[in-house]
Image: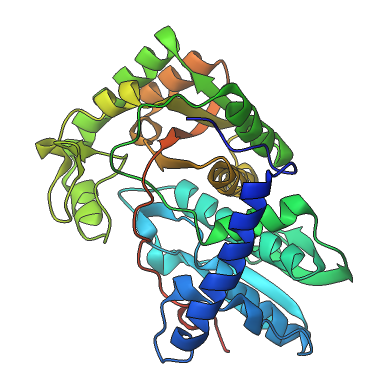
Amino acid sequence: MKSDPPPGRPSRSSFLRQIGDRLLPGHRASASSEREGADPWNVDEWKFPHDGTAREQLLFLVNFAVLAPSVLNRQPWKFKVVDERLLLFADRERALPAFDPNRRELTMSCGAALFHIRTAARHYGFEPRIRTFPNMAEPDLLAEVTLGSRIAPSTLDEQLFMAIRRRRTHRGELETSPVEDGARAGLVGAALAEGAILTFVDGQERTAIAEAISEAQKRLDDDSAYKIEVSASNIPAVGSVEKSHKVLAFGEWASQSVDPGVPAMQAPALAVLSTTSDTVPSWFSAGQAIDRILLTAREYGLFASFMNQPMHYEDTRKAVADAVGHDVPQLILRIGYATPPPPTPREGAESVVKDI
């Protein structure tokens, strides 16, 4: 299978596909979004309040923020508009003490939501102005967004925006087609654009990471608190675990599945996202980087899923670091081509906006 052209150089078929995606989803959503409790995935992009207030415009962008990937689909974010500023908060009430004790993945989830907002703002013709950690007295306040000068969105801006509703975490089988060098380079570039490092691994390095995944999963299987949090989520167990070539069903536990190191070895591509430090700001940046990577992947026709078991233990995380040659690995991605899975259910914007 050939990869799609790199972002910024779409083929005629890619361009026509984007036109169809722009028209048909909006047409379908125009009716459903009128209904109370409409599916957040069907947000009608044509209803953006171009002539509305800054508050109305910022609140509309939250419709896209809630479609970002998040740890166990917890959507651990809150938003508030104050004086024409959209404030993004980490929601501690949605933290996972056993699964994510230092809130590293929670912070990355919020970073992904911010990148969705940045992408949507540019699509609607605004240069987003971002201040991260604007008030040290409020550690849960991660970012402040205002709408800056008017711009003409670039082809890349539009491609990233169109990918928001086509992005899926794919936990099932991937096709065997290799991920071509051009696609790999495009994803590496997406990480670099956000100050992160994406490293594709093969050979001995992939084997070492697969072994770390397997070892970490064995320990997680014995962690009762961790298992309770995962079982209470509305997605399969952590780390793209497959069972008999099917996604692990809700309520089943990973110990019943194949060793997750197996799909790590079999994936068309395995990659590690790293940062230069291991601080809250670097986690937040990593979240924006992973979101750009995932949206870029859709332009190449690719899907990805996370295999982050080694990140839970110091020694297995170090094994990953040694394999890729970077000290601070943050995420492991299994990447390949596949049939699009259905979207994961989401709470709408009204559920995560404070004092609306």
| Percent of width and height locating residue 206 | 40, 16
* Residue extending furthest toward the right: 149
Based on the displayed image, in which of its 4 quarters is residue 6 positioned?
top right
Protein image colouring: rainbow
144 left or right, relative to 94: right
| Percent of width and height locating residue 180 | 54, 24
Near-viewer residue (134 or 214): 214
Based on the displayed image, in which of its 4 quarters is residue 310 positioned?
top left
* Residue at 59% from the left image edge and 74% from the top image edge: 62
Say above or below: 239 vs 155: above
Q: Which quadrant holds the C terminus?
A: bottom right
Q: Is residue 167 visible?
A: yes
* Residue at 65% from the left image edge and 64% from the top image edge: 117
* Residue at 21% from the left image edge and 50% from the top image edge: 225
Based on the displayed image, in which of its 4 quarters is residue 304 positioned?
top left
* Residue extending furthest toward the top: 204
Q: Is residue 222 visible?
A: no
Near-viewer residue (299 or 316): 299
